[in-house]
Structure formats: C-alpha cells, structure tokens
Image (spheres, rainbow, N blue to C red):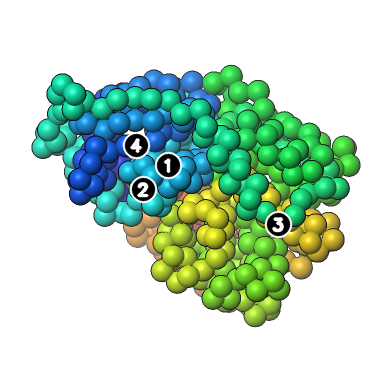
Amino acid sequence: MGKYFGTDGVRGVAGADLTCEMAMLIGRGAAAVLTSSTGHKPRIVIGKDTRQSGDMLEAALTAGLCSVGADVESLGVVPTPAVAYLVRKYNADAGVVISASHNPMEFNGIKIFAGTGYKLPDDVEEEIEAHIDDKCAGIPLATGDGVGRVTCRIDGIKDYVEHLYESIGGDLSGLNVCIDCANGASAEVARQLFPRLGAKCTFLGVSPDGRNINAGVGSTHLDNLEKAVVEGGFDCGIAFDGDADRCLCVDETGMEITGDHILFICGRHMKQTGELLGNTVVATVMSNLGLFRALDDLGIASAKTAVGDKYVYEYMTKNNCRLGGEQSGHIIFSKYASTGDGILTSLKVMEVMCAAKKTLHQLASDLTIYPQKLINVRVKDKKAAQADAKVQEAIRAAEEKLGDTGRVLVRESGTEPLVRVMVEAQDAALCAQCCEEIAQTIRAQGWAL
C-alpha cells in the first residue's frame, strides 16, 4: 500500500480526507501517468456510486483530467465492475470509479482502472502519488482547444447488463430470489437483469437518496435479508455492497454464505465441468482454513495472496487461473471479469444451483468453516502497533497455544485506521481467547484510538 492508495484506491471522508483539491491532483496525475505513451488525446471514463459527495468529487476529478488535456466520458451511477468492463469495450485509456464501496456514506474514494480493465499495480500508483506530492508541478496544463471535453454516455448500464446476460449459461427460471442492492450502484442493473433471466425477484435497498447507501442494508448488514429470506420462503438471498464489486448470499435457512463458501461451491462445479483451468482456486490470507482443507479434499489446489482483489487477479493472470476471490465476497471469474463483480458472482452461484438441482444450503454443507474471531482495533499508527514488541510476543504466545489446530493473522486495514486481529481454531473458546489477548495487548500498549 502506498501513501495515498490503499488496497482499493484512495479512500477517506469526503471533503475532509478526500478533498476536491486531492481529486483534482489525482485526475492530473493519473492522466499523465496512464496516457504518457498513447500518442493520442486520452479518453477517460468515470462512474460513481450513489453517495451525495459523488457529484462534487466527479466535478473536481473531471476538472483535473480536462486541465491536462484528457477527454472525459461520464457514465453516471454504475457498479465498479461495470467500469472495469466498459473501459475495455469503449477502448478508453483509463476508467475511474468514485466510490467507498461498503463504507458508510460520509466516506468516498477514487479507484482507477487501466485501459485493460485491470486495477493499477503498486508501482503505477506510486508514480501517481509522486505527482500528487509535488502538486503535479511537472505536468503541463492544456490551453485553448487542447483542454479536455466532457460528454455523458447513457448506454453504460445497457451494455453492462448485456455483458452479464451473456456470461451465464441458460436461465434462472424457477428460482425465487430476494436481492439487496444496498441503496447503491447495483439497483438499476439488478432490476433490469434478474427478471430478464427468468428469476422471480423481490428487491431490497433499491431507493438510494445519496445518504442511505449501506445504511442497514447490503452485504455488511445481512440481518434484514436473512429474516426476509426465511419469512418469505425464498430459495436464496443476494446482497451487494454499495458499488457492487462484492456479493454475499443467504441460503434458504437464513445461513450466511460467505466468499469462502462461494469459492468452494463454484470451484467444485467448475472442476466438474472442466472449467477450472490449472485446477486452482486463488484466495487471500484471510480465507478460512476450512476452505483450504475442503479444496484439498476435492483434489483442487489453492493459492494465497495478499488481501485485495487486485492481488488475487494479478496471481490469476500470471498463472492462468479462472476462479479467485476474498472471504468478504470479492469474487473474480476471470473468463468474464478483471475485478470482483458481485452481480456476476450471484449469477454464477444461482447457475450452480440450477445445474446441480440442489438448494444453496445443500451446496454449502460440505464446507466446514473453522470458528473465527476478528477484532478490529482502531489505532494511531497501524505499522507501529503491529511492530510493538509486546504485541509480537502476544502473537507468538497465541500461535504456540494453537499449534496446528488453528492460525493467527494480524494485519492492517488498507482503507481505515485499523489493525485487524484474526484467529481461527477448531476450538471456538480458545479461538476467542487468543484473539482477545492480542487485541487487548494492542490497547494496553497505548496504540488504540
């Protein structure tokens, strides 16, 4: 992670951490770095989620891009994976998404895709950061007819819906599904797509007002969806986050289906159908031990990357893998997408349900998830808190207690001032005890906010 870019772009409270001035600098720096060798007037597409601050930041970002000669095409409110797809379809030089994903509405963010549809590698983000640090002083400003122009594209959602429609084999007739769109960017896409595929749909979280994105709805707030699925007798529930790059599910019993469950369900199906190139599922270090052991039992290899779907995709690209993702629900089907796509993921899960003629609960029942405890500690300094000698001592003590029956993972958040303490173990009580001891040590050493 760089000085400004975290695991999912630049993120912060809009107007405070992420200011208009910062957005302008990101626009100028990104245009300079990403289009330096194109030999033509660069074109940048921009999408955003439903946050109230999105318009403000889009205006500032657009001003920055146009000021150095880039043309901007505004897509309006579209999911993050739509931008990753459309930047390639429209042959643009780069794509930008204004979104803070699953975070509360006061946050916002800027994430950038290259013309290939890939999230930027760390070294490219560092080049942009260098320009931000020197206020883009080395980037010449355009004048006269060299200044960029702004146009609006109204075909983005239609083109993205068509892409998703063509990514699934057969239809979803017979399924009765409850879909929570988090009052975010997926609302219009979902309402156009799912009924077209034959599914009977009930929608939640499809009334965005600029302030209610992720507010008690979506993939980080599953309680209402779980209740609705059980009481309504639905076959499953689907929950997206604010920008729809992640998806979690609820089975017919109300049980949460995590990203690990989805990797297991889809990985097994893809192996059976011969679609799992390399016979490998790519996950991150945050995935549950149970997933890796279940894949091993199926004869499927697994790989672990750093947290962040861009690192998952980098590994998948280098090693020709077709399926990868995160426990949080960022799942990548590389035949169809270059980033986590929550709507595509939900389609693939339902596709397996129809093909296997099994309920979601039945499909998930062969995966045993180890008890896991996660404590997020808000800290003054993420790196210093982790490096503290007493904290390291507490981590080693927990690892000795667990032996080969569990594991400890302590890492910093890429988007928030948090140290995440995660412990997994076969014994739930021991798991909770070890996790709390490490978290308490961080607090006792004075790092907590």
Q: Which amino acid does label 4 sit on?
A: Ile
In this view, 94 is above or below 412: above
| Mark 2 secondary-structure assignment | loop
Residue at label 2?
A: 115
Q: Can residue 221 be seen by looking at this rendering? A: no
Q: Residue 311 in the image: x percent, y percent? A: 42, 59
First in residue order: circle 2 vs circle 4: 4
Q: Residue 166 in the image: x percent, y percent? A: 63, 50
Q: Which amino acid does label 1 sit on?
A: Tyr
The one of 444 and 99 positioned closer to us in this rendering = 99
Residue at label 4?
A: 44
Q: Are marks 4 and 3 in contact (CB under 8 Å)?
A: no
Q: Is residue 388 left or right of residue 241?
A: left
Alpha carbon distance from label 4 to label 3: 32 Å
| Mark 1 secondary-structure assignment | loop
Q: Which mark is residue 169?
A: 3
Q: Can residue 400 be seen by looking at this rendering? A: yes
Residue at label 1?
A: 90
| Mark 4 secondary-structure assignment | strand
